[in-house]
Image (cartoon, helix red, strand yellow):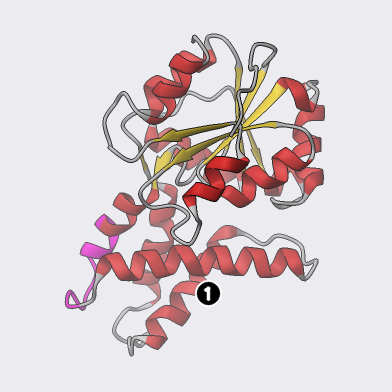
Amino acid sequence: MVHVDFSNTRSLIFDLMGTCADWNTSILRALERSPRTELSHQELAAAWRAGFFAEIHARFEAGLAAEDIDVTHRRVLDRLLGERGISIAEWDDAERHRLVRAWHEQTAWRDARDGISRLGKCFDTVVLANGTTRLQLDIVRSAGLPFHSLFSSQLLGLTKPDPRIYRRALELLDVSPDDAVMVAAHAYDLRAAKAIGMKTVYIQRATEDPEEDMAKVRSEVDLFIDGRDGTPTCGLVELARHLNA
């Protein structure tokens, strides 16, 4: 990581789940209401999230169109439950539907609301994330995140990390790559953004990128912020301080 001048920044483009919203807490709460309480809810939640990423990356590599994230989440959930010996008779369709819908209702990381609010007084604050517009609307509303605009993969017809999705977002914002910063808790996202000339900020979260070498990530991005302590002054508030917002 080298010193980068952010003074010409006009737009901050954010990933949503994991970066700004704490999906893990929300999914654990939903799982706690399910049958078979002897299951490790944390293990199942982590496997569900990992399975989702594996599915969307496989579809991207195969050149397939993005699908409704609810469909992906349901397919991954069905597979995980089957692997754990849980039949449709035990966790029926209504229960599985309830769990899939739980991804639409998320809490914000404690630093997210204040950080985004402060940043929004100085810069465009925009979501660019895989998924549907309905999902983004539901998460932003439930988490109370004050973004200026939402760009979903459904809306743009492309999937991250396709370089075209970042370029299309910049076109819609009427900014050049050098005037925009990608903010995410996922290294793959920032690598793709950096490849088209955007500046990059990595927000480290306790639930994200468990397989990544953080020393390597730190060396790749323009700014690395440790947002794992869970306080209201870390993460995006720290970013606001860094950008004098």
Report whether residue 130 is seen.
no
**Disc 1 marks which residue?**
75
In the image, the segment drawn in magenta is: 29-38
- Foreground of the two, 221 or 85: 221
Taking the image as shown, residue 97 lies to the left or right of residue 90, namely right
Q: Taking 121 as reference, is 211 above or below it?
A: below
Q: Secondary structure at mark 1?
A: helix
Q: x, y (%) of residue 175?
A: 78, 21
**Residue 30 placement (x, y as % from top left):** 28, 59
For residue 68: magenta?
Answer: no
Is 36 inside the magenta-drawn segment? yes
From the viewer's perspective, tell me whether residue 59 is left or right of residue 52. right
Query: Number of numbered discs present?
Result: 1
Q: Quadrant of residue 95?
A: bottom left
Q: Position of residue 240 (x, y in %)?
A: 46, 17
Residue type at tag 1: Arg
Is residue 32 in sight in this rendering?
yes
Q: Taken as a whole, is the magenta stretch helix, strand or loop? A: loop
